[in-house]
Amino acid sequence: MLMARCKVCSKELTSTSKVQFCGCSNQMRIVGDTISAVELSQVVLTKSKDIVKDHGILTENDLKYQEARRKRKVRKLTYEER
């Protein structure tokens, strides 16, 4: 069960199998486990079944490897024509 509140109109919606709209200019809608809006920064999750973590996926070693890989040069292969 998912509950979200629109900061523009302060309407709180609960997720069901039917589509629900808040009705303001932000047009927040909830369908099942999906929330969408014109501006998602104006939406606050009040209750969710999953805890959303906002941290980076890559470790520091992974970032160093990707940076070194980005600096590699492209080798051009030459072929003989017969």
Image: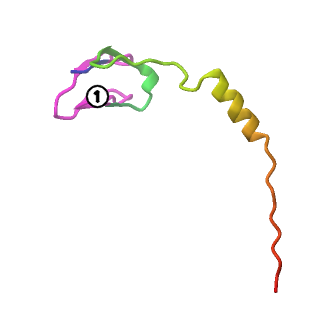
Main SS, magenta region, reads: loop
Q: Which residue is found at the position 42% from the left and 20% from the top? A: 42
Q: Amino acid at mark 1?
A: Gly
Q: Position of residue 7 (x, y in %)?
A: 38, 16
Left or right: where does residue 47 sit relative to residue 57? left
- The local secondary structure at tag 1 comes to loop
Neighbor class of circle 1 (other Cα within 10 Å; few <14, some 14-19, many 20+) is few
Of residues 26 and 33, the one drawn nearer to the viewer in this rendering: 33
Residue position marked by numbered label 1 in the rendering: 23
Of residues 78 and 3, the one drawn nearer to the viewer in this rendering: 78
The quarter of the picture where the N terminus appears is top left
Is 28 part of what is drawn in magenta? yes
Is 41 part of what is drawn in magenta? no
Magenta residue span: 5-34
Q: Quadrant of residue 81?
A: bottom right
Q: Which residue is found at the position 71% from the left and 28% from the top? A: 64
The quarter of the picture where the C terminus appears is bottom right
Left or right: where does residue 52 sit relative to residue 15? right
Residue lying farthest bottom? Answer: 82
